Amino acid sequence: MVVAYVLLIVRPGEESNVADKLKSMEDVKDVSVVYGEYDIVAKIEKEDMEALQNFLIKKVRAMEEIERTSTMISLK
């Protein structure tokens, strides 16, 4: 199991919309809209790194409202 925290910068005004989309995805375990450099933090659990990569590219980064992401992989 791979656990990742994805930090997202989204277009202004799209924070709630993107958060709702992320919350509806099965492998997204938690979503928070935050203040600071990033707009949203999402916790994602996938079976392996390849599945995580595919999910991030095909589902998360494919959203047109997202401007930039940064992914942190949890060690434990």
Image (tube, rainbow, N blue to C red):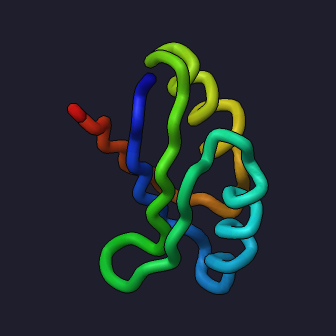
Asked if residue 3 is positioned above or below residue 38 in the image, the reply reads above
Asked if residue 3 is positioned above or below residue 54 in the image, the reply reads below
| Residue visible at 64% across and 40% down in the picture | 27
| Residue visible at 63% across and 30% down in the picture | 55
| Residue 51, horizontal then vertical, whole percent | 57, 19
| Residue visible at 22% across and 32% down in the picture | 75
| Residue 5, horizontal then vertical, whole percent | 39, 49
| Residue 29, horizontal then vertical, whole percent | 57, 51
- The one of 42 and 53 positioned closer to us in this rendering: 42
Position of 32 compared to 75: left or right? right
* Numbered disc total: 0
Asked if residue 51 is positioned above or below residue 26 in the image, the reply reads above
Position of 66 compared to 48: left or right? right
Q: Quadrant of the N terminus?
A: top left
Q: Quadrant of the C terminus?
A: top left
| Residue visible at 40% across and 40% down in the picture | 4
Asked if residue 3 is positioned above or below residue 53 in the image, the reply reads below
Quarter of image, res 22: bottom right
| Residue 25, horizontal then vertical, whole percent | 74, 47
Quarter of image, res 12: bottom right
